[in-house]
Amino acid sequence: MATDKIQRTLAMVKPDAINRSAEIEKIILDEGFTIVERRRVRLTRAEAAEFYNEHRGKPFYESLLEYITSGEVLALILAGEEAITHWRRILGPTRVSQARQEAPDSIRARFGDHANDSHNAAHGSDSPTSAQREIKFFFPDLTLEPVLTGEGAKEYLSHAVSPTLVRALTELCKVRPDDPIVWLADWLLVNNPNKSSGD
C-alpha cells in the first residue's frame, strides 16, 4: 500500500439515509477506511446555507437546503489511501437514477431515494480543499495533525511510540496485574510522553 497517498475526507449521511447509517458505516469500514471522528447533528437553515454556499443561486439551491435540514445528518471524517476519490467512487454518480444504472452497488444506488433523483443518501468532499473546509465546518474544535506517511511515520514510531510501549510492556511483565489491559491503559495515560505538565 502506497502510504504517501493517505488522505482525510468528509462523508455525510443525509437525512433520507440516516436510518441506514449503520449499514453505510459498515461499508465504509469494509472498504478499508478509518473513521477518525463522527458527529450526528440537525443543521439549521443558516448552517446548511454556509455549507452549500458554492451552490447559492443555482436552480436546485432552495430544495437542497430544504432537503438537508429535513432531519439529522451524520458527518464522518474518513482516512485512507486516496480517501477523496475512493469515497466518491463508492458513493457513485450524484443522481440516484444514474447511480442505479451505472453503479448499482454504490451507496447512492442502494440508499438514495428512488422517487427523488436529488435525495442521494450521502455526500463526499470533491477535493483536498473542500475536504479541509468541510471537516472544519462540522468539527471546528478538532485539531488534526498532518497524516504521517513513509519515513515520517517510521521515525515517529521508532522515536515516540516504540520506546514507550517497550517500557510499558516491561513494567507489565514485572507487575503481572490481574487485569493487564486495564493496567496497561492506566500506565499509558500516566506515562504518555506527549502529555504536557498542565494535563
Image (cartoon, grey):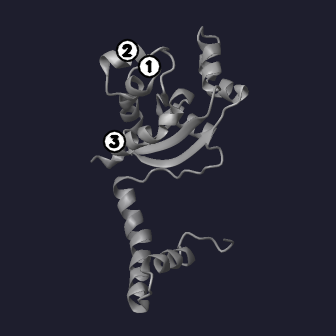
The reply to whether callout 1 and callout 2 are in contact (CB within 8 Å) is yes
User: Is disc 2 surrounded by few (<14), some (14 to 19) or many (20+) residues within 10 Å?
Assistant: some
**Residue drawn at the location 39% of the way across and 72% of the way down:** 162
* Lateral position of residue 136 relative to residue 35, left or right: right
Cα distance between the residues tagged 1 and 2? 8 Å
Identify the mark nearer the N-term, 1 or 3: 3
Camera sees residue 32? no
* Lateral position of residue 144 relative to residue 66, left or right: left
**Residue drawn at the location 47% of the way across and 14% of the way down:** 115
Question: Mark 1 — residue?
Answer: 94
Identify the mark nearer the N-term, 3 or 2: 3
Q: Secondary structure at mark 2?
A: helix
Question: Mark 3 — residue?
Answer: 31
Residue type of the residue flagged with mark 2: Gln
121 w.r.t. 169: above or below: above
Q: Quadrant of residue 14?
A: top right
Residue type of the residue flagged with mark 3: Glu
User: Is disc 1 surrounded by few (<14), some (14 to 19) or many (20+) residues within 10 Å?
Assistant: some
**How far across and down, in percent of the image, does residue 30 sit?**
33, 44
Q: Secondary structure at mark 3?
A: loop
* Lateral position of residue 152 relative to residue 187, left or right: left
Question: Mark 2 — residue?
Answer: 98
49 w.r.t. 37: above or below: above
Where residue 192 is drawn, which disc sits there? Answer: none
**Residue drawn at the location 52% of the way across and 35% of the way down:** 19
